[in-house]
Amino acid sequence: MYRYDEFDHRFVAERVAQFRDQAERRLSGELTEEEFKPLRLMNGLYLQLHAYMLRVAIPYGTLSARQMRRLADVADKYDRGYGHFTTRQNIQYNWIKLEETANLLAELSEVEMHAIQTSGNCIRNVTTDHWAGAAADELADPRPVAELLRQWSTLHPEFSFLPRKFKIAVTGAPNDRAAVKVHDIGLRMHANDKGEHGWEVIVGGGLGRTPLIGFTVRNFLPEADLLTYLEAIMRVYNLHGRRDNKYKARIKILVHELGEENFRAEVEAEFNRQTKLDVEVEQHELERISAYFAAPDFEVLPKRSADYEIAFARNPDFAQWVRSNIAAHRRDGYAIVNISLKPEGGIPGDATSDQMRSIADLADRFSFDEIRVSHHQNLVLPHVKQDDLYKVWKVLRANDLATANIGAAGDIIACPGLDYCTLATARSIPIAQTISRRFADLNRQHEIGPLRINISGCINACGHHHVGHIGILGLEKKGVEYYQITLGGSSATDASIGTILGPGFSGDEVPDAIETIVKTYLDVRKGGDETFLDVIRRAGHAPFKEALYAPAQRQ
Amino acid sequence: MTVTEIGKALTGNRLYDGEVVFLTRTGIWSETIDAAAVALEPLSQAALEKRGEAAVANNQVTEAYLIDVERRNGRVRAQHIRERIRALGPTVRQDLGKQSDGTGGGFAAHA
């Protein structure tokens, strides 16, 4: 994985010193809150309901064991012994004190971490496929490009005061696990007829109050042109994006208002106007970065491991976990281990410091020192030998980290909601917990099959409810929470925005409503191969509406 | 006999640690909502607001704003669920926040 060079170390250390000075000036009263707020936000420090919240960047969701241990230490020393992994592959701490934040950032900088650009109207943490470098279906590891984008976009003077925040996602695999179609810019690597790799550039996707699927502004961009082209997009946005209305300031609104053809023409004109010399991706620089992401020293192993097969046959709990949480690795004899942070009745994405340390130990021993954070708020050990799977599972199980529900009903995405967040209109975590308990039977979850339930506590959609197969949006009317349900969303290759099913429900009613929706799916599906999303796309909302609302209307 | 007083209280987050605080009758910022001064009349509410502006200017709190509350038998219930959660801590982790350290007060989110 990428290691800081001297420049990176100095840069982050200087940034910590700068923030220390800013915080001291704020505490002494030299700076007003109005002056200080944009400065703290550019360093990921929010003020939430109960305390300050710090969002720490985990570039493209990749962590070493040492970094994970430091995150655990920070949780113990500066927070309340836990952290919350987010849908942007970052981690948030909920109980931070302003007076301690500079020390915290200094400790993070020792392990090459920071909180720069995790907030504010700038280019945020670049996200990618959490199986990058490991997935069997991958064309190439997207992380060198993600790192290149990180270096290019960090404190870029031209793009530090954009009309609004800006999110970029990158994938190097045909099966999109990075949700590239619902980002401001999504980059998807693919091959042309000659077998050369290039990038599909997708612009104008996003969730929030105006959910939209992005459009392809360029289908096949050579890698050498990547930064020049992205600069062109950023310039068109910076120039024409609306600054008069924060709700219309994202690039998706600009694309919508200009129209796709006009937007493309603007970008191409700007692209052709540039000299390219300044920002063309120099091959040797990309090679330098790529060297950090060289595949680990994999052993040559048989396709199947005898130890693993025996454990699989003998232990049904292990077998269930394997079927649910293990994904195919590009190398024979290896596997990708997905660690669910969604135990029955748990808080999605939360991990205690002890859990973080146990995962760090596993990464050290069994996964070439690598851990990933997924935008589904789970963790990943990307390179585990099949021979070691049973040992890994036993450790995970001892730490309440072996719930066999990846991609199933219990694997719920939920934002912090009104339990923590100042923007929230309703709580999302308790809804996730009650649904998780309702579907606690893992056999039933697997009978239901792939089902993505996403919950947001407000229209800003941090819980990605628009792209949940079942989306739940928490709203408020006269101080009372209620929840709107959408069906048919997806953030995968076949991305789509869910649509509202009907009138909302109280929090107490939501689990029954989800139960009814799932039962209806099981009744309507044509065999076990037809997934929940398949049924929505074939049959539409009608059977679900009938099951949910007709009984009440008949009364 | 239960007497319910309906009015407004002044709240904010303390600058140095972000802790939720409420202005008391003696002008101190308390961590406990039950200690909050409840202003029943527009004039006293305006006076509370002035105190809030001064506290922001003095860098005691980051922002100060009035919330709708009612006092029942010495306990203060915020009208809005958001403020009831601020007064106690997250409903999903009762081992955290004011509810766990003895400074909680007021009423639960659903009360």
Image: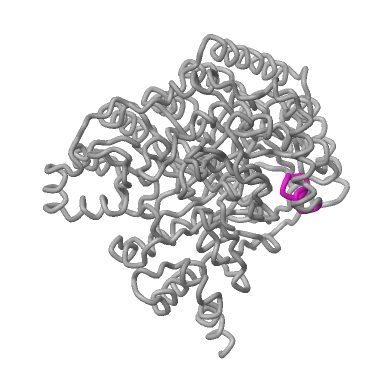
Q: Left or right of B55: which side holds B95?
A: left
| Residue at the right extreme of this rendering | B43
Residue stretch rendered in magenta on the structure: A249-257
Residue at image point 69% right, 63% down: A477
Query: Where's residue A528, x and y in %?
Result: 34, 71
Query: Where's residue A330, x and y in %?
Result: 32, 40
A252 drawn magenta: yes
Viewer-closest of A14 and B85 = A14
Image quarter hosting the N terminus of chain A? top left
| Camera sees residue A165 | yes
Viewer-closest of B107 and A41 = A41
Query: Where's residue A277, x and y in %?
Result: 70, 20
Image quarter hosting the C terminus of chain A? bottom right
| Residue at the bottom extreme of this rendering | A554
Query: Where's residue A520, x and y in %?
Result: 44, 77
Where A530 falls versus A196 (above or below)?
Answer: below
A93 drawn magenta: no
| Camera sees residue B71 | no
Residue at image point 70% right, 20% down: A278
| Residue at the front extreme of this rendering | A194
Residue at image point 69% right, 38% down: A165
Where A284 falls versus A420 (above or below)?
Answer: above
- Our reading of the magenta stretch's main secondary structure is helix
Colour scheme in the image? one colour
Name the quadrant containing residue A250: top right
Viewer-closest of A529 and A470 = A529
Residue at image point 79% right, 30% down: A273
